Amino acid sequence: MSTAGKTIDIPDLINNNKIGSFQIGMLILCGLCVIMDGFDVQAMGYVAPAIIADWHVSKANLGPVFGAGLLGMLVGSLVFSITADKFGRRPVLIGSTIFFSLCMLVTPLATNIEQLQLIRFITGLGLGAVMPNAMALAGEYSPLRKKVTLMMLVSCGFTLGAVLGGLLSAALIPAFGWQSVFYVGGVVPLVIGVLMFFLLPESMQFLVLKKRKLDKVAKWLKRIDQTVTITADTQYVVHEKEHKGAPVLQLFTGGRAKMTILLWVINFMNLLNLYFLSNWLPTIAREAGLSTSNAVLAGTALQVGGTIGTLVMGQLIDRSSFRRILLPCFLVAAVAIALIGRPDVSLAFLFITIFIAGFCVVGGQPAVNALAASYYPTTLRSTGIGWSLGIGRIGSIIGPVLGGELIRLNWPNSTIFLVVAIPAIVSAVMVFAMRGGPQAAPAKVAA
């Protein structure tokens, strides 16, 4: 594609070109960063049994440690997403990656629960900034025809990182001790952070709106389309305008209030479901009579379903719309979750229902992230994603706590899973409520 004249439409140029090595390299860097995000978020869960044995503490003592990490992520999502919309995705993503990698390297120095709790909270601050900015960058360099698929692939790195973390931890802990998991979880993202410093571009739309480093914009446009003609007086078009005022308040202006509230509720409900299932499913399965290995496989089936769900739903949404895919997705999730608790079902039936629940709940979360990234304009994109995830992470904290309380009441599994199916129904209702809202199809910057 050859672009001549004094005006270059950046979104149009991206949409009308093939995805080249420059964009692929950027997506790989963002994906690797998200993989290590998932690895490091789940690291505490993998090393917990070894720490319990090493420090001679009870399982209950580690509850505040898990909560501290999630609370740190919540704060990081809220604070650093706003920072990114002010200063750029690139510096915040690089800075947060290096920050949490250094925190991981410091973690083995902890000698008691209180120190570990503090370090995990601080680490969570950096981890919480990764997903919103990686998603924002991925979306801003992707053509509309593949935008949702590519954003969801990047987001899927979180689940992949969690799976890799489990496999590596199983090999590292017996050979080198639990500290080795944190060393790996610190060194690898540190290397990724250095690579991003040299190779990761900033959002071109962001720079144009902020009127900064337009020479960099010209350089990156040439990487996408070598035939583009750029002169000293070239003007860039992004079809958006700068939003003044507090970014969070801007999420509720310009007709965005309804979608913002709907996204917050969906994130809260779906992450409540996701973290309940991720944390309690193996334990409940074991107490229901499954062997330890089958109980672990039950948790694995959830994550495998989520990975496949991400890959499939991204392509379906790109061909249809968020609403048409997510509405049945959450309705099916509610049915699958309710069926998990049915007594006297075959092992095959149980694993199928867990897989389907993972497909819809775990696989649906990247779609919700992509929906936020697609809906909000450039100057609010990181804030929109970050605050949706931040509110959602309140649900991620409540989910495991709610599960513990329901188990403490000695309710039968059938009743517990019926209760846990309710948030999925609420998510479906919220998606249905998007009807008639602004920007309702992906090709039009979807809702």
Image (tube, rainbow, N blue to C red):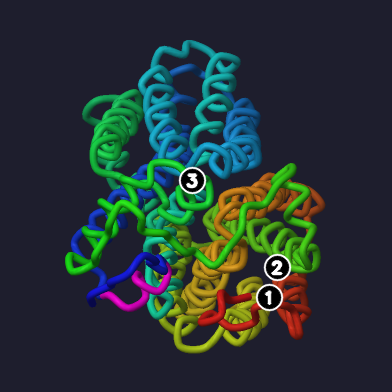
Q: Indicate the amino acid at tag 1.
A: Ala
According to the image, label 2 marks what residue?
417
Please name the residue that numbered disc 1 is placed on: 338
Which residue appears at 41% of the width and 81% of the height?
315
Q: Which residues are magenta?
A: 11-17
Badge 2 marks a residue whose secondary structure is helix
User: Dot 1, how many residues are within 10 Å of its Cα: few (below 14), some (14-19), or many (20+)?
Assistant: many
User: As rendered, which of 49 and 395 lies closer to the eye?
Assistant: 395
Query: In terms of depth relative to the viewer, which is nearer, 340 or 346?
Result: 340
Mark pair 2, 3: CA separation: 52 Å
Q: Position of residue 413 (x, y in %)?
A: 70, 65
Query: First in sequence: mark 1 or mark 3?
Result: 3
Q: Spatial distance from mark 1 to mark 3, Cα to Cα? A: 52 Å
- Closer to the camera, 87 or 430? 87
* Badge 2 vs badge 1, beta-carbon distance below 8 Å: yes
Q: Callout 3 environment at 10 Å: few (<14), some (14 to 19), or many (20+)? A: few
| Helix, strand or loop for disc 3 | loop
Labels 1 and 3 touching (C-beta < 8 A)? no
Q: Position of residue 150 (x, y in %)?
A: 38, 68
On the question of residue 280 being in view, the answer is no
Quadrant placement of the C terminus: bottom right
Residue type, mark 3 in image: Lys
Residue 86, placed above or below residue 332: above
Is 395 left, or right, of 15 in this rendering?
Answer: right
Q: Is residue 385 left or right of residue 310?
A: right
First in sequence: mark 2 vs mark 1 = 1
Residue at 31 percent across and 46 percent down: it is 216
